[in-house]
Image: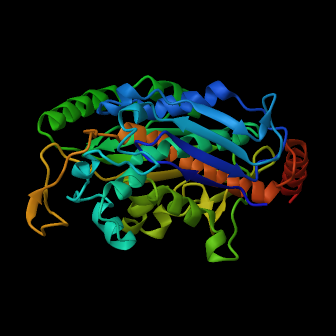
Amino acid sequence: MSLRYLTAGETHGPQLTAIIEGLPSNLELDFEEINFQLQRRQKGHGRGRRMQIETDTATIVGGVRHGRTTGAPVALFVENKDWKHWTTVMNIEPVEGSDETKRRVHRPRPGHADLNGGLKYNLKDLRNVLERSSARETAARVAVGAIARQLLARFGIKVAGHVVSICGVEAAAPNLPIDELIRVTEESPVRVADKAAEQKMIELIDKTKEDGDSIGGIVECIVEGLPVGLGSHVQWDRKLEGRIAQAVVSINAFKGVEFGLGFEAGRRPGSQVHDPILYNEQQGFHRASNNAGGFEGGMTTGEPLVVRGVMKPIPTLYKPLPSVDIDTKEPFTAQVERSDACAVPAASVVLEHAVAWEVAKAFLEKFGGDSIEEIQANLDNYLKQVAAY
């Protein structure tokens, strides 16, 4: 069975819910680690007041017994602490005798799903769109990805993320072992290893907030310890690069993705792009460089996976852009919902977990079994096959 998940819930509803299907049995889960990853998503210089309200934790309510998965679907939820302030506005039952209709959202915000969603679903209260399209949903995705991350870690696969740039302020490319990169960036409020760039980014975020504006940036995820051959060249929708690209651009506010050299490959001749193949008995087949970002032909090469995503500035501005009232059709200044000046450091964490999920899914497709022990046996047999090639 293929690994899959669904999420449900609204940004100001009682909770976010996720159900994961396809996990093997006997995967030992570290609940504190899942919550640690959720808390990482809430950090970062430039986050708004919502992060002062929420302290995200995941509660698992199905599919796990005595700390281990059973092979059944895993159900979890993340409580929304802010729900207590929205119990009338977001009540599931009809609410009568109140002034809630006065709080109807009828002024779509540029850059959001408000207008498109209202038109598509014929909703005259745009809160029905913005509540679900909110980036709050990424808390559920991180919880799901954190479980996938633990599955990968069980087989020696490590995932790291960091910020490459924020609104043109570039961090020097880190030349660090993955464990050191994880440690150093975790100590940075903007998730960079470059201290000089860190200070410039902080200053720029502060200035942006004062101006009532927002800024975006570029984030990178690295995955090490992958075997060769995850994904496939035989059909377009089995190419792992394509599946990861879809997952990345599905993250709220992400507008582009690249692997390895990415778009830079279009500015270089082939002799400076492609990775020479080497062989020795200790390493087997390997590459002299990793310009391809760990992929050739839609399959992993065994080199580190390197994927970057670009996040646009958050469209909710404290100096709002012009919009049009859907009732009167008159120009109006867009409504302001509580927001961040910069969420790029948090987006780095979301990217890690979106990538971890797709890698875990491909890993189980290749080595799948009903239990962790069966998967381990399948992996060991494949690694022997590759070593003997």
Q: Give the colouring mode of the picture.
A: rainbow
Q: Nearer the viewer, residue 318 or 167?
A: 318
- Residue drawn at x 39%, y 70% as measured from the top left: 121
- Residue 114 position within the rendered picture, expressed as x and y whole percent measured from the top left: 30, 60
- Residue drawn at x 45%, y 38% as measured from the top left: 162
Task: Pick out the residue farthest to the bottom.
Answer: 235
- Residue 210 position within the rendered picture, expressed as x and y whole percent measured from the top left: 13, 33
Task: Pick out the residue farthest to the front.
Answer: 97
- Residue 289 position within the rendered picture, expressed as x and y whole percent measured from the top left: 56, 52
- Residue 352 position within the rendered picture, expressed as x and y whole percent measured from the top left: 53, 44
Task: Pick out the residue farthest to the left.
Answer: 331
Quadrant housing the N terminus: bottom right
Answer with left or right where residue 117 lies relative to residue 308. left
Quadrant housing the C terminus: bottom right
- Residue drawn at x 56%, y 66% as measured from the top left: 242
Answer with left or right where residue 126 lies relative to residue 274. left
Q: How many marks?
A: 0
- Residue drawn at x 28%, y 38% as measured from the top left: 340
Q: Quadrant of residue 208?
A: top left
Residue 40 vs 169, above or below: the answer is above
Residue 235 vs 313, above or below: the answer is below
Q: Quadrant of residue 266?
A: bottom left
Answer with left or right where residue 82 lies relative to residue 125. right
Query: From where the camera sits, is residue 66 visible?
Result: yes
Query: From where the camera sits, is residue 220 visible?
Result: no
